[in-house]
């Protein structure tokens, strides 16, 4: 899990959470 600039969001890209 890497929230660098908080650009990943469940609403925008739910795939990021799966590929963290």
Image: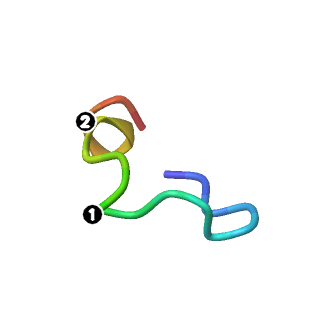
Residue at position x 25%, y 36% in the image: 18
Q: Quadrant of residue 12?
A: bottom left
Q: In this orientation, which residue lies closer to the viewer: 3 or 13?
A: 13
Cα separation, mark 2 vs mark 1, equals: 13 Å
Q: Which residue is mark 1?
A: 11
Q: Classify 13 as above or below 15.
A: below
Q: Classify 16 as above or below 9.
A: above
Neighbour tally class for label 2: few under 14, some 14-19, many 20 plus, Cα within 10 Å = few
Q: In this orientation, which residue lies closer to the viewer: 1 or 12?
A: 12
In the rendered structure, the answer to whether residue 4 lies left or right of residue 6 reads: right
For residue 18, the mark is 2
Element assignment for label 2: helix
Instruction: Determine the residue located farthest toward the bottom in the rendered image.
Output: 6
In the rendered structure, the answer to whether residue 8 lies left or right of residue 11 reads: right
Residue at position x 74%, y 67% in the image: 5
Residue at position x 39%, y 40% in the image: 16
Q: Give the percent coordinates (x, y) of residue 6.
A: 62, 70
Q: How is the image coloured?
A: rainbow
Instruction: Determine the residue located farthest toward the right in the rendered image.
Output: 5
Q: Give the percent coordinates (x, y) of residue 10.
A: 27, 62
Looking at the rendered image, the quarter that the C terminus falls into is top left
Element assignment for label 1: loop
Q: Give the percent coordinates (x, y) of residue 8.
A: 50, 57
Question: Mark 1 or mark 2, which is nearer the start of the sequence?
Answer: 1
Number of numbered discs on residues: 2
Q: Classify 14 as above or below 4.
A: above
């Amino acid at each position: 899990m890497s929230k660098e600039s908080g650009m990943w969001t469940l609403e925008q890209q739910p795939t990021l959470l799966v590929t963290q």
